Image (cartoon, rainbow, N blue to C red):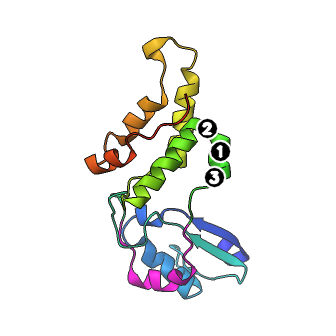
Amino acid sequence: RIYECGGVILLDEVDAGPEGLCIRINAAVGNGYLSLPCGRCVKRHPDCVIIVTANTYGAGATLDYCGRNAIDGSVIDRMGAATITLDYDDALEDSLGHPDVVRWARAARERLRDHGAREVISTRWIADATSLICATAEFDGDAQIKLADCVRSLCGFWSEAARAHVSGIKVGA
């Protein structure tokens, strides 16, 4: 309906979709027509905006996103000129995270970036670590989850080199 009548279509994480998905998207974007399973062919409305997101640049799985598929070159050719790379939103992270968690995450990201490491410290991790720390703040002793516990858990699957890059970052009390 949106394709035919106008509006915004968001196709999120297409690099995680089934094989051939991007080719079908490509036809709908590039040709201006969409063939429906019922056999009907629909013309794209001039006010139909299609936004496609991915966690990779189309070359397939990376160390960060190992479950991703490569995106066909014709799709990249049609959409590559409008590629927008987004970074983390400081205001959002400040609103979601405990200040110590946010400071540690930003310092760690900077160190990882400086060393060319590709490990991810997501906004989701900041929010989750904050929730765990706050939820157990009233507990005694070992029942309390501290920032160091969250960091250990986050870094547990990282390479030894990446762990070394972020070791020693101190924030808060």
The magenta stretch spans residue 78: yes
In percent of width and height, residue 71 lies at: 39, 74
Amino acid found under the numbered disc labelled 1: Asp
In percent of width and height, residue 94 lies at: 65, 44
Q: Quadrant of the C terminus?
A: top right
**Side (left or right) of 159 relative to 31:** left
Residue 138 occupies which quadrant of the picture?
Answer: top right
Q: SS for tag 2?
A: helix
The alpha-carbon separation of the residues under discs 3 and 2 comes to: 12 Å
Marks 3 & 2, CB-CB < 8 Å contact: no
The residue beneath circle 1 is 94
Residue lying at 53% horizontally and 62% vertically, measured from the top left: 12
The disc at residue 99 is: 2
Q: Quadrant of the N terminus?
A: bottom right
The earlier-in-sequence mark between 3 and 2 is 3
The alpha-carbon separation of the residues under discs 3 and 1 comes to: 6 Å
The disc at residue 63 is: none
Whether residue 26 appears in this view of the structure is: yes
The disc at residue 90 is: 3
Q: SS for tag 3?
A: helix
In percent of width and height, residue 82 lies at: 57, 80
Amino acid found under the numbered disc labelled 3: Asp
Residue lying at 36% horizontally and 73% vertically, measured from the top left: 59
Bounds of the magenta segment: 69-85
